[in-house]
Amino acid sequence: MGRVAPVFATVAPPTSRCLWPQRDIGASFNDFMGKTHQPSKMPRKATYGKQAKASKAERLFAELPQSPVRKPPTRRAAVKSKDPEPVTVKDLTEHLSEIQIREGSSDIEEVQQVVRKTSKQAEQEEPAAADESEDSTPATSDAEDDVDSEEELEYEEDSYAETTLRILSWEDVCPRGDRIEKIAEASYAEVYRVTNDRGTSIIKVIRLHSPIKAKTKAQERAKLVDEEPHAEEDINGELQISEWLADIPGFVVYKERYVVQGKATRQLLETHQVFQRRMKRQDPGRAQFYPSPSRYLDDTRFLVVELGDAGIALEDWKLTTESQLWDIFFLVAVALARAEDLAMFEHRDLHESNLCIRQVHEPRTRPPNSRGRFYGYSGLDITILDYGLSRAEDLSIDYADPVSNDLEKDLGFFTSTHAPQCKVYRQMRSFLLRADRVCLPPEEHTTPYAKGIDGLLSWDVFAPYTNVLWLAYLYSYLSSNFRGEKKELQNFRSTTEELWKYLNPDARDDVPCFSCAADVVGFGVEAGWITESQLAGSAHSILEREESIIVSRDDDEDETASLRRSPRRSQYRQSIVE
């Protein structure tokens, strides 16, 4: 393949400190599509380089119909002027909702119909107070288990805090006969998969300020660490971002949230134990950060967020074909580019645990006459999860305050070296401080709100280059964890050699770079890896509302009670891949 002229910012000479302007990038993907982001409260910087003439992508996409724009929630809608706004050419990201792989009719395993038997004995049943950390330790006495902890006293006043959400029990979440499986531990939350006769959901469980039983002596000896409880408003930002992104293909479907209160069921305890034992086998030095369900009391409360089932985490997915590498990388890039445009979104934590994969239809063989096209053959779809560290804002409101997590409150993100993604956290913060590729070492991240090139560091700013950093991390992860034939990996790397040149965060100062995820997608279009028909063919989406599968026992026993329906919809996407 011949060299492709990059359509992104050209780096300034080494004497200049600002290698890539964070907002107004010269000849960026949005610029050459005829529309420039004007994100808010950040000073403009000089731009470097420009495109000499209209590119093939510009001429092509200027003629495409505009894709529908998500309607903002009514309660936050701004008053719009009756005067029509000037018509402008929408950039590629307005059409990215149509870039996806055709979803075939995959086989769905029928969930066995079960009769819920709820007796007084089952309601009062308590799980055995055994934890995986205590498997090799004699059981503690009843006196030890009955001791009130300081934590109980500290949170007693908050345990009955008012809430507008419905309150369920763990027996409601997973009655006997249903299935619950702990699958991950995310930022501030435990993650479970729940399956019943209504379907499958993912639930994120966040402990609220409320009493909990004291640790046993065995748990103390095991040096168990309890994740700090949170106030309900602490995660409102993440939920708000979930709603803004719910109409964008590639992001998780939000169903509902509610409060769960009371003692755990035996099923919850057992899946917690199985998960902890599995994690210990994989990493013997791993600490347990979430309390055992055996310690839940009648007043222990959790905020539970119910989401659509996204599939298997990338870290557990076996990468075996070249087409999987192409599709996973560009499906993520397309989703991020669309979110950049519609919500000025940065994920800021997109490692292999926060990306899920599903096989939606059978993979196809790439035909000999594909003429450079590589995208759309694996049959995979992706879902981006966990917006706990993310940044976004409501573009329907002028001068709206962004929603973001102030990472300066926990500099441990940047000083830690326990996992590969810790370097990306440092790269993000270094970029906000210096506006160049230099990654400061851990010891340079010990002063909160340090002064950078734009003044005191703030995570409110829109710096989409962080999405590029995570795409670079994804590219490296896919290449390093490929388990297929070496020839296929070599072909992928050689074909994308120039892409990696501009994506690589460790490249030389004189090498141009991508400024945002939209730049990466634009490069793929210019290279011919993604075709015209995949961008603007007869692709369509079917929008439906997706139901919560969790109901209370009272509702379940009432034959006339209808299932609660979520304000969010599920998307079934089909793309022209022929």
Image (tube, rainbow, N blue to C red):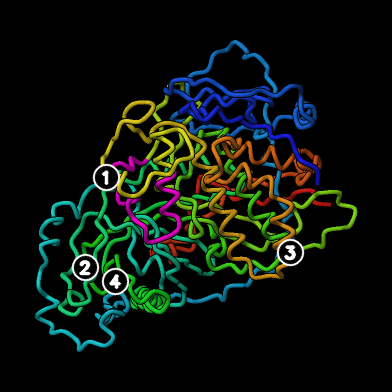
Q: Are marks 2 and 3 in contact (CB under 8 Å)?
A: no
Q: Are marks 4 and 1 in contact (CB under 8 Å)?
A: no
Residue with the mark numbered 4: 293
Q: Which residues are magenta?
A: 405-427
**x%, y% of residue 475?**
60, 53
- Residue closest to the eye, 93 or 439: 439
Q: Are marks 4 and 3 in contact (CB under 8 Å)?
A: no
Residue with the mark numbered 1: 446
Residue with the mark numbered 2: 297
Instruction: Measure the C-alpha gap from mark 4 to mark 3.
Output: 46 Å
In the shown orientation, is residue 351 left or right of residue 61?
A: left
- Name the residue rendered at 13%, 82% in the picture: 142
Q: Name the outermost residue toward the top.
A: 83
- Residue closest to the eye, 358 or 307: 358
In the shown orientation, is residue 226 left or right of residue 467?
A: left
- Residue closest to the eye, 532 or 524: 524
Circle 4 sits in a helix, a strand or a loop, which is it? helix
Residue with the mark numbered 3: 488
Q: Name the outermost residue toward the front.
A: 15
| Of the image marks 1 and 2, the number of the one nearer the N terminus | 2
Instruction: Measure the C-alpha gap from mark 4 to mark 2.
Output: 9 Å
Circle 3 sits in a helix, a strand or a loop, which is it? helix
- Local packing at callout 4 (Cα closer than 10 Å; few below 14, some 14-19, many 20+) is many
Q: Amino acid at mark 4?
A: Pro
> Within the image, what quadrant is residue 541 found in?
top right
Is 407 magenta? The answer is yes
